[in-house]
Amino acid sequence: MADAPVAIGVLQRELLLPQAGGFCSFEGWVRQTNDGRAVSGIDYKAFRPLALTEGQAILEEATARFAICAATAMHRIGYLAVGETAVWIGVAAPHRDAAFGACRFIIDEIKRRVPIWKQEHYEAGETGWVACHDVR
Amino acid sequence: MADAPVAIGVLQRELLLPQAGGFCSFEGWVRQTNDGRAVSGIDYKAFRPLALTEGQAILEEATARFAICAATAMHRIGYLAVGETAVWIGVAAPHRDAAFGACRFIIDEIKRRVPIWKQEHYEAGETGWVACHDVR
Amino acid sequence: MRRIELEYFAQLHDAAGCAAERRETEADTAAALYDELCAIHGFSLSPACMRVAVNAAFCPWDQPLRDGDHVVFIPPVSGG
Amino acid sequence: MRRIELEYFAQLHDAAGCAAERRETEADTAAALYDELCAIHGFSLSPACMRVAVNAAFCPWDQPLRDGDHVVFIPPVSGG
């Protein structure tokens, strides 16, 4: 949970373990349009104590389910402009199958159950809570 | 095809398009051990002209098959020490399904058909051509 | 009567017009408390699409409330 | 007789003891040329696990060779 931009390189370097041969990462970026509406930015709010414990639980589940070496996740909170990185997930594993599988699992679970809400700010001036996820 | 370390950040920034909401990347790192043998480094050789055209063809196929905005791939050639990044793939897409799918497709195809060979250098002093891929 | 600490997020924050409040209530479960608050604040989200957290941990809607509990109703999340 | 430019990679490089050579040959296809080179250099890789590139493009093993062609036999690849 970060209130300001995070140096992704620093997060990634901590995953650079000698037994890791594959590294998969996912980033969620603030998109210019959603459902055809022009977006100027997104305000992310979180119920922090629960978001932190739930995020940690997801990383532990990923480590138990997939043959990975290490995984990290970061989520920005606050107002982000178009193009900023809202979420970053990095997974290091001996082989790529586990790296891809765990990375996908972590982003899916974050979107499904971590108490974070995004309020889109539209170019036209209104705002709106994004109520349900695209499940893609 | 790069003979020296590449600034991944520069490659990634070119994929930061306003319509992209998801970004998936994969990196292959030189691992400390393979099949139980201690590796000191890997020497990558390529048949360059064909590796370049085949790499370009894979990126074009990924763009045709998946709903992505842009994709890039980089492969190091020459001697790499343990922990160095041998291959980097980055894919930006409106949604994460396409980003993950295309990224996985590109690394699988690179491993399957781009004329690059790795010769492992072992701590014990010998070397060996890695003849067939783990298919994970 | 129990004294309950409430925090509101997203649509519930907008409807309640505040981020947090303390209430005295006769409600003995999270479900009963939410019904009570629907009448007061005009919440329109159905509990069927929500979860509830007591003292910063997810719990069942029928968990008994105790004096001093901190309760958060969790609207559909949209992080990532 | 055709004059063919050859480049060798990986195990074929080791077996031939050189990275490239120019040969005069009667072989009229890539497959025939590989058979000829097996006898000369002792290549042990089966063509069944390899591909062949003529003038830097993959092609069928039975593609006719022309004077001046550049031929590369592609051992099983292992990039990534």
Image (cartoon, coloured by chain):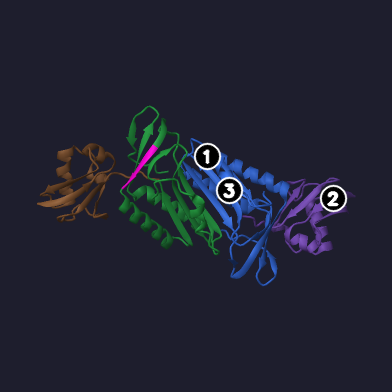
Chain colours: A blue, B green, C purple, D brown
Q: Is residue A5 above or below residue A92?
A: below
Residue at image mark 3:
A8
Q: Amino acid at mark 2?
A: Ile
Is B71 rendered above or below residue B121? Answer: below
The single residue placed furthest to the front in the displayed view is B4
The magenta segment is B42-46
Tell me the kind of residue under disc 3.
Ile
The residue that label 1 is drawn on is A16
Disc 3 crowd rating (10 Å Cα; few below 14, some 14-19, many 20+) is some
User: Which amino acid lies under the numbered mark 1 shown in the image of this protein?
Assistant: Leu
Among numbered discs 3 and 1, the one appearing first in the sequence: 3
x, y percentage for residue B27?
47, 46
Answer left or right for C21 relative to A49: right
Q: Which residue is mark 2?
A: C4
In the structure shown, which secondary structural element does the residue marked by tag 1 occupy?
Answer: loop
The quadrant holding residue B123 is top left
Most foreground residue, A14 or B80? B80
In percent of width and height, residue C69 lies at 82, 46
Q: At which x and y percent is residue B52? A: 35, 54
Mark 3 belongs to which subunit? Answer: A
